[in-house]
Structure formats: C-alpha cells, structure tokens
Image (tube, coloured by chain):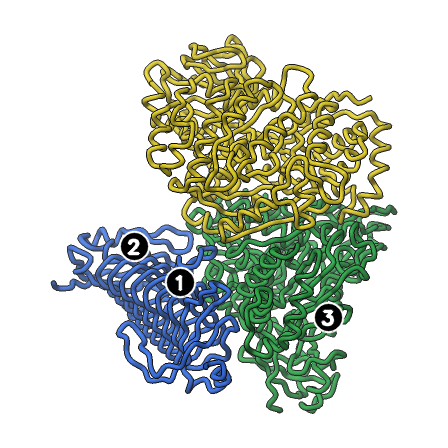
Amino acid sequence: MKLKEIRLRLKYDFKVPIDVRCVSPDVFAGKGIDDIGNLQVYEGNRARILKDLFIIEGEVGKTPSETQITIEGGSPKLRWIGYRMNGGKISVEGDVGHYAAARMHSGIIEVQGNAGSRLGAKMEGGNVEVFGNAGDHAGAYYWGEKPGMGMKGGTIVIHGNAGSEIGGGMSKGTILVEGNVGQLPGIDMTGGRIDIEGDCEGKPGARMKGGRITILGRVPMILLSFYINNIVESTTIGPKKVRVEGPFYLFQGDVMANIRCGGRFYVSARSNPHLKPYEKFLS
Amino acid sequence: MSGIILKLITGRTLDQGKALETGKFARDYKESTAICEIDSGDLRKLSVKSGSNIKVKTAYGEVVVRAVASKASHAGVIFIPMGPWANAVTDSNTHGSGMPTLKGIQATLESTSEPVPSIVDLIREVSRKSVKVRISSSAAPSSSEYTLSNVGCSFCGCVCDDIEITVKDSKIVRAKRACPIGMTKFLNYQLERQTKPIVRKQGKLVETSIDEAINMAADILVNAKYPILYGWSSTSNGAMRLGVELAELVGCVVDNTAVMCHGPTFLGTHQTGIVTATLGQIKNRADLIVYWGCNPANAHLRHMIRYSALAKGRFVPEGRKGRKVIAVDVRPTSTSKMADMFVRVDSGMDYELLTSLRMALKDYEIEAPSVAGVDRETIIEMADMLMSAKFGVIFFGVGITMSVGKNRNVEEAIKLVQDLNEWTKFVIMPMRGHFNVAGTNAVMTWLTGFPYAIDFSRGYPIYDPGITTVTDILARGEADAALIVASDPVSHFPRDLVERLSSIPTIVIDPRWTPTATIADVFIPSVYIGIECEGTVYRMDKVPLRLKKVVDPPQEVLSDEELLTMLIERVREKIRR
Amino acid sequence: MEILIKNGYVYDPINRINGERVDIAIKDGKIVSTDLIDTRRAKVIDAKNKTVMPGGVDIHSHIAGPKVTAGRLMRPEDHYKVFMRAIPGVRRSGTGRTTPSTNLIGYKYARMGWTTVVEPATPPLETRHTHEELDDIPIIDKLCFPLFDSNWLLLDYIQDKEYEKGAALLAYLLYAVKGYAIKLVAPGAAEAWGYGKGVGLDIDDAIPGYDLTPREIIRGLCRINEMLKLPHTIHVHCNRLGFPGNYETTLKTMDAVSDLASEDRPVIHITHVQFTGYTGWSWDTLGTGAEEIARYMNTHRHVSLDLGQIVFGDATTMTADAPLEFVLHHLAPGKWSGSDVEAETAAGIVPLRYRKRSYANAMQWCIGLEVALLVQDAWRVIPTTDHPNAGRFTRYPWLIAWLMSRRAREKVLKRVNRRAASRAILPTLDREYSLYEVAIATRAAPAKLLGLKHKGHLGIGADADVVIYDIDPKSIDPSKDHAEVTNAFRRAAYTIKGGKIVVKNGEIVKHVYGKTYCLKPCVPHDLLESVVEEIKPKFREWYSVSLENYIIGEHEIRKPEVIPVETLLK
C-alpha cells in the first residue's frame, strides 16, 4: 500500500488561534485538491477555508491509511490537528498548538517541533510522537471530568519536556517523556502507564487509583499518601518496553483515592538518594 | 551576593491597599508597594541594610526595590506586595491552570545603588507603545450636605453594608465604620481621574467625544480576529451581562480577574463541588475558624469583626472567646498573631499538609515525622481540633490558589472539609478579593455555563482554563485586541503579559487613568459603582447586594452599562455592514 | 401586532373547550374577541389539522438562583457537549444539559410550548440573585417561591403561636424579596443542618433549638397562607424525602392541614410526590406508595400535587434538603456542593444518574406515573420532573407520551429492571390521558393552582400565550402514535408569547423577555410597623446585612408584575 503525500505550506505567520480540525487523513482521503482547499477552518473568529491559509500540493489516497499529510513548517497557533483521526499519517515539520491528536482513534502523528497543551487529550488509539516539548495536560481529561476519562489508549512519546498534569485521568495507553515533566503527572489516573526519563517537579501520581508511573530522574518528594512496597532491580519503560536497570523504589498509592492503593509508582533510587530513608519501612 | 536561596511571595498589605486608592502614580503607592519584606536574620546574612535598595532576581526578571526588615521571623521567605514591582519578577507560565505563579518563586537578592524605578519607568521598560499619564481631578458639580446610611463599600469582597457616608459639596467627607482601606477609597476616589475620553492618534493622546471613542473602540473590536474582554471585577453585574453579550456578538474571549486570584478555586470546584455557607452562618455558629493562606488582617479588614473570629453571633455570643482560631501560612502575619494556633507550612506544600490532615482523620499512618515543615504531632493535634469543633470553617486565600499545586490544593482543601462532615459540621469559603469578582463570575456562569475564560469565537461558549484564559492567550501572543473594563492588569499581570498587552490595540474603560490606561489606544472614562451609580454586586459568600448611588458623577461621564450598551449597538451596526 | 389563529382544534379546559374548532384572536398581547381583528392587517396563521392550547405552565422547575448556578459551576462537563450557537439578531448562545444556561432554559421551554415557569425554592437572602437569573431567561414569564420553613424570624412567631404577627412578617418578607408563594422544604431540616443534623427528620420529630416540630411549622405556615389569602397554597417538599417508607410521612403531611381547609380548594401542594411515595425499608425493598397516596387524593380535595417524574439518564439533584444531599453524596460518590444560608435555609447539590437496570430507579420511574394514573382529578395532579432533580424539563414530551399511551409505558417497562417491573402497579394500569386531560394537567390546572388568572386559558382577556402543536386530534391515536405525540410536543409549530411569535417550526425566531410575577399582600400599617420594629434587633444580631439592603427594589427587576393581595389581616 503506497502512501500518498499531500503537503501544506503556511501562507503567512499566524497570530490568532487557527482551528484546523479538518486536517486529518480521514477528512482528506478520497477528496480532490480543490475540495480540500475549500474545507472550513477558523482563524480566530473568522470562518475561512484551508487554501486561504495554506498552499496545498500533492495527492491524497483513497483511504485514510493511504494518506499522509505533511505540514511544511508549523505554528504554535495551529489547534486541533488530527482531531478524532482514524488512520493515516500527519507529519508536522515545525510546531503545533493545542489539542493536537485530541480524541485520536488510530494513525500516526509526528511533530518535529513543539506541541501545545492537551496533546492527545482523551485519545483512544494511535501513535503520537513529538520531537520537541509538549505543554500541559497531555493525554488528559477535561476540567470537571472524573478519573478514567482521560486517555483511553494509544501512545504518546515526547522527546523533549512536558508540562503539568500529563496523563490526568488516564485509564489506558502509554505516555513516554524523555525529558522532564512539571507537577502532578498521572493525577486521577486509573490505568495505563506514564514513563518519565527526566525529572519531575513534584506531586507525582496524586490521587491515582491504578496504572503505573516510572520516573528515572529526580523527584523532590513522594506524596505521603504513598507507601513503599519494594525495591526492584529493573523495570521497563515506553511503548517498546525497553528494560532499564534500577534499583527502583516501588511505591503504592494513592491511599486517599482508594484504600487498596492500586497505583504503582517506580522511582529511580540512584537519582533520588534523598529517598533512602524510606528503605527503613521495608521489612 | 550571597548564596541564600529565598522564596518570594507576593500579596496584599494594608498600606498597599490604601495607597492604590490614593493613586498608583503617587508617591505613597511606590513607598508602600516597591518594597521587599525580609527576615532580619536573612538581612544580616546577606549584609543588606533595612531601608537600602536591593535588586531582586528570579528566573523571570529583576527589579530594584527597597529592603524592609520584617517584624516577624520568616527565614527563607521574602515578600513583595502585589503590584508592578512584584510582577517584574513573577512567572507568567500558568502550567495549564490559567493562573500565573505568584508565590513560592525562587529568588536571590543583592544590594544595589540603582534607584527604585517609578511605575512609569517599569511600564516603559516593556511597553511597545509610548506611555503617557493624563490625570486630573473631577470637579464637584453641586453644593449640598447629606448623610446616607447602610451604604455598601466597594473595595473588597467583604462588601460591608453598614457604612454611613456624609457628603458635603458633592464630596464624601466621612465614611463612618469603613475600614482604613474602604475609607481611603471613599475619600479619595476622585484622585487620578480622567473625565474626558482620550484616544491615541499617531502616537499622540488626544481628547475626543464619547461618540468618537466608542466608534474607534468598535472598529478595534470588529477588525480584530481574537480580542479579549478582561477585567469586570470592579463593575456591576449589569455591566458584566453586557460584557458577555458583547463577547458573543464579537466572537471573542471574556474573562475576569479570577484568572489571577480564585480561578483555581473554580477548577477545584469542578472536580469536587464545594461545601460552603453565607457569612452570617459563620458569625452565628462557627466555633473553629481556620485562616489558610489568607491574611484578612491585611486584605479583608473587617472580616474578622463582622463575620468571623471576632464577630458575636447567636450561638457564639462571647465572640472571640467562644472560638478557636488557627492560621496556616508560610510566614507569620497580622492574622496569625491573633490566632490560637499558627501552623507554618513550607511554601508550595499546602497540598501535602492538607493530605496529611485527611489521612489523620481517617487514621491512616503518616510515615514521615514531619510534613510540609509541620511535625506529625502538630498535624494530629490540628486534626483533633478540626474534628472536635461544633461548626468549623476554613477561609482560604491566594496563598493556596497561587502557589504550586494551585487548583489541586483547593481541591484537597475542599475534600478535607467534605471528609470532616463525617464528624461534624464544616464548611469552606474562598476569600474573594474584589468587591464584585464573585458577582461577575456568577453572571458568566448563568449566562454561559462557565465561570470565566469563555471563548465565543465559534459562536457558543467554549471553556478550557490553561488555554482560554486571558493570561495564557496573552502569553502565547494569541490576542490581537483587548478591552479592559474596571481593572488594572498592567499593575497586576506578570511583566511579559504586560508587554503583550501593550503590543495590541487596547481599549480601557475605567473611572481612573490607571497604569493600564497609559498603554491604551482608546480610553473612555466611567463612573464608580457604589459611589456614583447603583449596581448589584455579590459579596465573597455570593450574597447579592445592591450598592447605592451616593454622589452624582462628573458631568458627561457615563456608567459602564451605558457605555457598553453604546458599544454593543455600534459593533452591531458595523458587523451588519 | 394582531394575530388570528384559524381552524385549529382548541383545548381550553378552563373555558371547557374540548377540541372544537375555534378561532383565536390576539391583539396587544391579549386574547380578544375575533371581531376586533382587522383580518387585512393581522397575521393569519392557519392551524388546520393542528392542536391549539394555552402556553404550558410549569409549577416546579429549578431554573434560577444560587443553587442552580452552584450546580452549573460544579458540572462544566454538563456543558461541553450540549450547546446552542448564537444567531445574531435572533437568538443568543448557551450550553448545558441538566444545568442549562439561562438562554437555553427560555428557548427550550418555548420550543416545547411552555410560557410560564416557577422557580420553586429560593433563599430569601439571595433572592436578588434569583431575580437576576430569572431576568436573563428569555421568553417565559416567571415566578419564584422563597423558602420560609427554617426562617429564624418566622419560627419565633410560629413557636409562640403569634400567627397574625407571623402573617404580617411573612407578607413583608414576601414582598421584600419579590416572591410569589410560601415554600417549605423538609420543614426544619435546614435548621437542623446548621447543627449537622436533620438526616431523615420526620414530621413529628423535634427540631433542635426550637420547641417545634415540622408539623407545627407546616400548620403555622398554612394558617398564615390562609390569613394572607395568597393565590397559591403552601408548596411543600415533604420530610424524609428519598427514604424508603416515607409515603407515611407524605400522608401525614397532607393530613396535617386537613382541618384548615375551609372551601373546596386545596390548602397544600405536595411537590415531587414521587420522591416521597415509597414503601419498604431499604433501597432493595423499595415499593410503591402510589396507591395510598392516590387513595388519599381521591378522598380529600384539599391537596394538590406534582409528580417529580424520573427520567432515566443524567440528572443533577439540587434542593434545600441539605441533609438529604449529604446522604446522596454517600450513595452516589462523587461531587457534592452545599451552602447554608444564615438564619433561613440551606442547599445541597449532587449529580446523579438514573439507570434502567437499577431496581430502585426503575421503581421510582413507575411510582411517579402510577400517581398520575391513579388520581382521578386531573386538576390536582401536575406532571413535572422537578427539573433537574428527577430529570430535565426537556423530557416533558416523553412524559406526556407516557401519560397518554400505555404502549409508550410498556416500551420502557420492557427495558427496566425486571424485579421492579414485576413489583410495580404500573404495568396493570390501563388509563391513558386524553389531549384534554393533558391540557388540564400542563396548562389549566397549574395556572389555576397558582392563581394566575390570565394564564392557562384562551378566554377573552387572557395573556396571549398560545401554542400550536402539529397534532391532528382527528387522525392521530396518541395511544398508538405516541412517538408522533412526543415529536409534536418537542417542537411546537408555533409558540406565541405575549402576542409575539417566538417559535416557528420548533425554532426560536425572536428573543424577548417576559414578566416576573410577585405579590404585595396588604398589611395594616400599624401591625406592619410594630412587627418590623420587633424584628429589627433580631435582624441586626442574626444577619450579616442590613435590613434596608435585604429588600429588593422593583426597579431591580426587568419587568416586574406586582400583584396586590387583599389579606384577612385587620
């Protein structure tokens, strides 16, 4: 199956938020370039069409899985790229803004630059890879939603750093961050996994009911509602389940979310010598 | 320069509160707000003299202020009153919460011989437009003398409605029972006013008619693609309704000052709900009062005597003697001084302390000997006090909402109170700052379904703090025009947001020529709610009050409601064309 | 503007018109005689093969006030998926399913052909807020009922049996907050909640701090209501709401004032009786008390009621019965909001979901309909969903279908919990409401119970609130074609409010604002003055605002309609 590529080039520097949820292989597939150019987008509060904003060249496949959309360049103002995407590939050679890959079903999204907030919010499947940094609330639920309403499947890989509350409310899926993360990763999580190779600013796993978080770097403190369970030699991280050598402290919690402490939290002993005093609770 | 790492917090003080009513361009404001309170021990370690100038540096900027030795001891913590000097060094990154980080910022400081900049200097440092000050005083229209009683005060969220105002020659000469800050507002509201509309034409400020100013404002809003309508907390509900109508008509974002204050309280409420009461219920029944991360002695001056610790109520007729008071804060304050128990919590660790209390209630084991700088025994003692109250209340302020954890701190505090209801009666209440921030949030909630940060660009309300909040929009340079009503973001936003605001066409509607007006393209004067016109406002506990008109406004100055009605009409005409 | 509606089948029970072809003429916002219309200039609507009714009157729906806004605030997720776009010049935007924003409330009622709605529970101290919200609800006319059962000032008078003073005070407070009727919610429970108590407080239990029982409060306020001759009766949410076995309390409540009834009209209105109509002693043994309640209703004429019918799906419970909400918070773990209002009342809000497969929820669904079908007098049984407690008001079209069609009921019964379906009486009930009875229950009766003389009918002088539904009574068999009935009531062909066409083919075509009705009962000057002097020191001690600022001015309300009431006070 040969992938047909359609290329979008920004016509100018965007200032206000641009809603390009139509940029998705399942919207483009089977359409002519003219039809694609006439797809509705929003520039702030102005209804526009795609060709007002982009120069469009190339061809699309008959089906989403035969379609690749490449955005030459990028912009932190581009919102909702790949929204509800179901198959195919989107490749962004620059930055994207908020809500990229939100509610994604399947397919591949690659972002060479940075992503905004709510990357892969409530996504159900597919693979997202950001080579730069991502903002806050990656793979998370929306305000007011209950635990488990976040990411439900798929994988998010962030090569740079990520912000706060990543994986909030997630129930399934995998998030891998090679850089550092901000506060409260995995808040309200009920399942799935979050693996962080860098440091975490604080309060990891707050209110988690299930799932697992792994931190290879430094975390200033463990929440007091977590109890140390074990020291393990090694563990795996990421969608490819790469083995990493420990030792790792295994904490269980959050007792305030569920007395059964179904959440597991692996933190590197070597990167966190200040956590050694916890060892005395193991017996 | 010494290597001590200090944590910077910002907040209100009594002097700063009074001074902002006498005028932000005046000397008192600089004297009271361009300062840094430092623990005496830290001063010695840093070899800095009290009264000398220091340069405070953070990862976000640097500013020169005057060092002041603190009377209380709070090693490791420095305090700069909220305002433009503090905001030169605060973090505009909201970390997905909409609320910049204004407390708990890592800082260093050193002596300097540089002078303390004036407020105009500070604005000029970042503004893309030329900064001009055009203040005058309003003339007294007529001569008479009268007294009005049961006047509501339009300063803070207490909205004390027992003030007796005496007016002589159209000037308020007495505000009986008002606190020092309220009184300062009543007696000085006519300072730093500008009663003529002023527009910026080719870089020059020119007086013009209301009609022309409205026309220019309408042009700005209609031509923009993503404007923001911000402020609102110091105007009436009637004006807020029109603000929402305008935002819907233009298709843009409307947001109020909660984004900088109790926005995280809403985010916490979204997750858990909130169990609260009106202030009279506290007065009548509460025998345990916790002030957590708030300082009413400085910011809500009559709160304690009218509603809380010192108030006499039906079931607490002895007042203070019939109550226990606990204060939780990162440093001792005037409020903690009168508490029965002061719990000093490490900055940014309120979440952990709240969790430890919840765990103590449920008898879960707390393994560490101390949490957030509070030892386990104290935590258990405090939990006991909470559980054995007949009716307890936690009043919380920006100490929780602004420091690390933000909305999750509030959520944890609400959960603590919900847990306590298993044992006894307990409620929680946010200490809202402005006199009508609660009202304008309520108006937005019933009109749109959401309390603030509402984006109408798609023709219906969309809400996502961290993305639709004005702070985040400005930080990412996404707004291309702004309308500021009854608010002064140039003084209270972190500096880089001020820079963004100054780089877009800005309309300001305010009774005063504020620091925000210095970067406006269109300035339209308006009248004071609760002094020069009537208006409905909600107290911090959301009790609705109708503020009175006490004096006539200056001639030809209209109310926010009248101006917004005109603006809506004009925008509608232009859109139709 | 003049309108002439021709050829429609009119259902106007107050004027005894049962489906006859009558022309309806409208001029200057009122129904007028047809010969006053200039047919050349009037807008003529041909309602051939359609049903014409007065606009619907909802006697109990939580649409405005502090607890409604608190409900919105704690449920942003209720607002993400359901929204309406603004159409400039035609309609505003809004969001929300169980806690809709104000514009949506007005539009969605109007689209179904409802034109008058009551907000049934507002805390007096915060009623200024309620009025601000009501003012922002377009199209419909509005009323609100302030809560008085736990009011410290009134309780003193009731305790001391000083009914005349109590009546004078209540008249003063009612006009002060621009309310319309006396509301009681689990009388005394809000006061008990101030102590953290009150869960399951029964009608003859002692209320902490007072020498009073809920029964005495109900009787006291009923007497006061009769002395003031208020157009509506006391409106009562019974004690022990939600507790299995509580039907007994409901019967006791109804009976508690039977001796205070003098004429052949109700003296008490029991609201959302479904929630207080349970036999059994636990959620597993929950049974229907509908038969007992219906039996009482059929043998006593001093009681009216509304259903509080469950609709499966999402709901948001919000009531002044704060102790109950505390219990619900435990039954349905999740979010919980509450607010105590000083010296007056309380509130609690808990989101809930009614599930078909739940035994208790299925039973609840049956009980509401059983009451509606077993009580014979359609003038005293009003279908409501206690929006948003039992269900959203936008489900009225389905509720009407359930009343009119046994088949519609069976369709639901097939999919509910089996045990409930077998224990309920509902499957055995054949009765089907006629269109005339629907017109009684949703228009004529509530208007009459509220004492709104110009609502609920299409006689000369009535307000021109008229609805045309796409139902041809000659060709439709509601029992079989219940889905058509539902569709017709979902989207009115025309809704006319105050003589203006606001809905056409189920879409909003005009954004206007209705009136807010409130009462000014006449109290002799000396009596009023002495009572106010007496309460002033208490007010100062107990409240946190001044009495002067407690009072709401008429000018604060967009379109107030103040109705003077001749009382029995001398």
| Subunit under mark 3 | B
Between disc 2 and disc 3, the foreground one is 3
Q: Say which colour chain B has.
A: green
Horizontal and vertical percent position of residue C533 = 86, 37
Whole-angstrom CA distance, mark 1 to mark 2, is: 31 Å
Q: Say which colour chain C has.
A: yellow
Q: Residue furthest left?
A: A1
Q: Which residue is mark 2?
A: A22
Q: Given the image, on which type of amino acid does mark 3 rest?
A: Met
| Subunit under mark 1 | A
Q: Residue furthest top?
A: C35
| Subunit under mark 2 | A
Image quadrant where residue B369 sits: bottom right
> Circle 1 — which element?
loop
Quadrant where the C terminus of chain B sits is top left
Quadrant where the N terminus of chain B sits is bottom right
Horizontal and vertical percent position of residue C316 = 50, 44
Using the image as rendered, state which of residue B369 and residue B300 is in the foreground. B369
Q: Which residue is mark 3?
A: B341
Q: Given the image, on which type of amino acid does mark 2 rest?
A: Cys
Image quadrant where residue C448 sits: top right
Reply above or below: A238 against C289. Answer: below
Res B50 seen here: yes
Reply above or below: C391 against B455. Answer: above
**Badge 2 density bin: few <14, some 14–19, many ≥20, Cα 10 Å:** many
Residue positioned 80% across, 31% down in the render:
C161
Residue positioned 44% across, 34% down in the render:
C365
Kindly indicate whether the residue at mark 3 contacts the one at mark 2 (C-beta within 8 angstroms). Answer: no
Res B26 seen here: no
Q: Given the image, on which type of amino acid does mark 1 rest?
A: Thr
